[in-house]
Image (cartoon, helix red, strand yellow):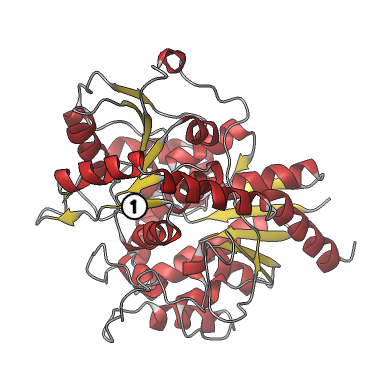
Amino acid sequence: MNKFLFTTLPSNDLGLLTRSLPIANELTKLGHKITFSSPAKAPKKVIADAGYENLSPKHPLYEIGFGGFSIKRFRKILKSKRLRQEYGNLFTFFFRLIRSLPIKFATSSPDVWNMDHAAAMAGMMNRNFVKSQCDAYIRLLKESNADVVVDFFNPFSCIAAKALHKPLITVIQADAHPDSKGFIWWETPSQNLPSALPAVNKVLASYGLKRITKMEDLNIGDLTLIVGTPDTDPLPGNPEGTYIGPLLWQQSDAEFPPWFDELHHGKPIIWVYSGNPRYASKATIVDSEVIIDASVNVLAQEDVQVVLTTGYHSLPEDILPLPENFHHARYVPGLDMAQKCDLMIHHGGYGSCQTGLYSGTPAVMIPTFSERESNARKIAMLGAGEYVLPKTDDTKKKHVDLEEFRTTVNKVLMTPSYSEKAEHFSEQLRGFGGPEKAAQLIADFARNNNGE
C-alpha cells in the first residue's frame, strides 16, 4: 500500500475535484490510502462527503482566505488550543500574515494568456508570498507522511514536492503543458505581459532547484498525465506526458430532487450549470453569474424546462424568484444529468466540457475568462457546441447579447449534427482509459519508485 497526497489549486469551485476524486476512488479500490489538500469551502464539503481526509496548509492566509476576516474569528482562533500552539499570540499571527501578503499584482483581466500571466494576477510576483506558500506546503507534505504527491494545478505544492525530492505526479490539461500555446492560443501574445517568473525563480533557487523558463514547467512531474485525448486536447509534436482520457465524477449516492421525475418528457430539458456565481462580494473576472442572468432572461420565454445548478453555491438573491419553467438544485449527479438533458449551458469549465462530450450532449457555453474560452473554442471546433462571448463593463460585471444567446441556444437545440458530433467523441473518450488507466499508471509508478 502507498500513501498519496492529492493537492489541488485552492479555489472555491469543484472543477478540479471532478478530476481528482475519480482517480482517488480507483486507487482506494487498489488498496492505497488517499489524503486530500483542498481547503476551500465547497471542495471541503465534497471531499468530506466522499469520505476522504482533507488537510489544510497551516498559515494565516488560509485562516483568513477560507475562514473569514473578523475580530470575533481571531478571538476564536486564539482561544483554540491547536491554533494557540501554531501561532502563539496575536502578534505572531499578524507578523506572519503581513510578511506574506502580496503587494504587487498584475492588472486583473479576463484575458489570461498563460499560467505565468495568471500567477502574476494571483500575487505570485511577490517573493515572500510565494515562499510562505511553498513553506506551508512543505510542512503539509512532511506532516502528511505521503509517499507520492499527486497534484492538480497547484504550483506551491509542485515546488514543495520538488524541494523535498518527493515523487511528484501531475494531472493537467493540455493548455497547462509547456508545449502548449497557453490559454489564448488563437492569438499572438503581447511581449510585455507581467511575469511571476523572477519571484518564483528566486524561491526555487532558495531550495536549490533549477530555474524555470515558463510557469508551465512546474506542471511536469516525475509522471505527467494529460486529461482528454490527442483529438479533443491536441498538443504539438510528441509532448512529455500520457493522455488518459476523461476524468469525471459524481457522488455514488447522489439522487435527483423529487421534482425531476415530474418534468414533462415532451419538452426539451436544458441543464444550466453556472459553477460559482460570485467568488467575492464585488464582481471578479472569474464570476459565472452571467450564465444565470442570461439563462433567466432568455429561457423564461422559451418552451423548455430548465434545471439550474450551482455546485453547492448559493443563488444570487437578485435573480429570485426564478421563472416558472426553472427548477433549482444546489447539486445534481452531473453525469446522469448530462445524459438526461437535451442541452447543457455552462461557463466553459474543463470538467463541464468533458462531461458534455462524455455523455454525448451538445453545449452552449458562456466562457467567463480565457481558460474557459479556450475550452469552449475547442468544443466548437469539434462541432459539439457553440459559445457566446460575454462583455465586461466598468464594474467588471459581465453581460451577453441576449438575442445572440437565444439564437445560439435554438440553433444547437434544433440542429442534429451537434448531438451527433458529441456522441462521436463520447465513444472515443469512453475507450481511452479514464480514471482506471490513470490509477493504474500512478500505482505502477509508486510501486517502481518505492521498490515494492
Depicted 312 relative to depicted 247: above or below: above
Instruction: Judge left or right: residue 418 versus residue 109.
Output: right
- Res. 265 image quadrant: top left
Instruction: Judge left or right: residue 316 versus residue 200.
Output: left
Q: Locate residue 48, reporting x and y percent.
A: 57, 34
Q: Locate residue 361, reporting x and y percent.
A: 47, 41
Residue on which disc 1 sits:
386
Instruction: Judge left or right: residue 220 versus residue 259.
Output: right
The amino acid beneath tag 1 is: Glu
Tell me what residue is drawn at x 9 percent, y 57 percent: 394
- Res. 94 image quadrant: bottom left
Q: Is residue 74 visible?
A: no
Q: Locate residue 254, reporting x and y percent.
A: 56, 25
The C terminus lies in quadrant: bottom right
Mark 1 surroundings within 10 Å by alpha-carbon count, few (fewer than 14), some (14 through 19), many (20 or more): many
The one of 377 and 163 positioned closer to us in this rendering: 377
Q: Locate residue 98, reporting x and y percent.
A: 32, 62
The one of 337 and 11 positioned closer to us in this rendering: 337
Tell me what residue is drawn at x 39 percent, y 74 percent: 116
The residue positioned farthest toward the right in the image shown:
452
